[in-house]
Each structure stands twice: as structure tokens, then as C-alpha cells.
Image: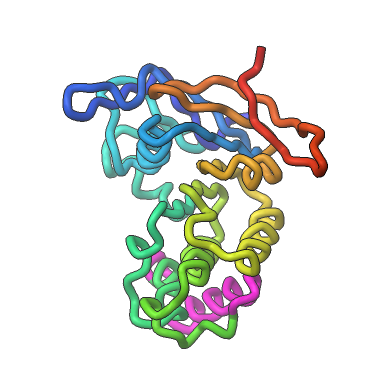
Amino acid sequence: MIPVVALSDLTVMRGGAAVLRGLSLRLGMRERLAIVGPNGAGKTTLLRCIVGLERPVAGRIALFGTACGGERDFRPFRPRIGFLFQDSDDQLFCPTVAEDVAFGPLNTGATAAGARTRALEALAALGIAHLAERVTHRLSGGEKRLVCLAGLLAMRPEVLLLDEPTNGIDAENMARLRAALEAFDGAMILVSHDAGFVAGLATRAMLMRDGALVEAEIHDHPHLHSHPHLHPKG
């Protein structure tokens, strides 16, 4: 089966230093991959490369079996790949929640009525339909996170790229976030410092160190209670 994302020997340089070093990765449809690692390891850069927001100096990127090099190559695939930014304020720019969530469908061919319907459906699926007419910049951190995710889900993507999805989120909205991600039936890459959250959702895990990826295992350690953890294989 053709992977939805295939990266081969990817190298990204910044300021004369390698951020990604010959990195390779394959993501299959419906696979949920957790990637964890320290700050500066290259996790966000990896996600940006997948959607063409950052360009490698070497290596190959293929989306849905098609090699992508320039902007023209990436553009048709972006509606199929939802990218949740690390900072919600970088992703919200319309006055109200409903307008923001409808923006993607509206700009990829949906009618105004159709885009609003898809927006309201996405908000309802996340349990936040009551926020539809709220002003986006007055939302809490957790509400902003869910509204950003609703904007992605309204596009009906086949892949989600989630950069620190639990940033600024409270317990109530965390439960909504987890339920929505558990219900998503496409492929997913979860980048996070919250190993317990992503390990509970992932079907596979990798650790990023110094711009490279190594396979990891997900398992539970016995404590007074149980936590999922990620560890390098071997």
C-alpha cells in the first residue's frame, strides 16, 4: 500500500547547522504515529517540511505517492492534510469562531452555506457548538485549541499533523480533544512533550534526537497507577 507520507534522507539546514539529518519516515493510512523529543530536536521542522512550508536541502518528500518539490506540487495536497500549529494564535484570524472554521471549506470551493454547515458540524463534533458566534481572540487557550482543530476537521482531511496538541488546554477540553482524535479515521502524526497523551492514542512511536528518528516502543510501567511511556527500541 502506498504511504500517505514518505520522506527519504531529508536534510534541513538552518544557520549553517543541520536541523534534520538524513531523516526518513513512512506513514500509512490510518496509522497514528507519536513523535517525541526535546526542544530543538527538529519535530516542528519535520511537520513543516511535510506540507511544504520548509524546504530540505537534500532528500525526497512524497505525498499520497506523488513526489513534491516546489510550491505547485504541495498546493493540491494541503486540503488533504490538516496541520495544527503549535501556537493557536498563529492559526486563528477570522473575527468569529464560525467564520474561522468555515474559512477552509469556503476557500476550497464550498458555497457560503455549505462552508457554514461544515463548520457547525465540526464544532458540534468537538462539543463546542456553543462557541460558534464567539470572538476568536476572547477564547481561552483550550477553546482556541479546539477551534483550530475544528477548522482542520471541517476540511475533512485524510491526514492530521498535530504540533503539541495539548498546549494550553484544560482537563475538560483535553477530554474533548482526545475523543475527537480517537474518532478520526485517517492517518495522524502527533508531536508532543506529553508522552502519556500521545502514547495513549498512537499505534506506533518514534523518538527524535538531533534531527534523526529512532523507533520506540509504547508500554506501561507499573506504579500505584499505570502510565503509558515511550522508550527507544533495543
* Residue 174 at least partly seen: yes
Q: Position of residue 73 (x, y in %)?
A: 33, 40
Task: Tell me the colour scheme of the image.
Answer: rainbow
Q: Nearer the viewer, residue 90 or 222?
A: 222
Res. 30 visible in picture = no
Q: Quadrant of the C terminus?
A: top right
Above or below: residue 176 compared with residue 43? below
Q: Residue furthest bottom?
A: 133
Q: Residue at x 45, y 79 (%)?
A: 97
Q: Residue at x 63, y 48 (%)?
A: 186
Residue 110 shown in magenta? yes
Query: In the picture, residue 100 is in which quadrant?
Result: bottom left
* SS majority, magenta: helix
Q: Nearer the viewer, residue 226 or 176?
A: 226
Which x, y percent locates residue 230? 64, 30
Q: What is the span of residues highlighted in magenta in the rendered image?
A: 107-128
Q: Count how many numbered circles sit on residues in the image.
A: 0
Placement of 227 over or under 122, stated as above or below: above
Is 8 situated left or right of 185 in this image? Answer: left
User: Residue 92 at what x, y percent from top left?
Assistant: 37, 68
Tell me where residue 72 sits by quadrant: top left
Is 25 displayed left or right of 175 in the figure? left
Residue at 35% over, 65% down: 89
- Which sits in the foreground, 4 or 173? 173
Q: Is residue 4 left or right of residue 63?
A: right
Image quadrant containing the N terminus: top right
The outermost residue toward the top is 234
Q: Position of residue 40 (x, y in %)?
A: 36, 33
| Residue in the picture at 51% in, 78% down | 114
**Which residue is situated farthest in the left direction here?**
15
The magenta stretch spans residue 135: no
**Residue 52 as seen in the image, left or right of residue 29:** left
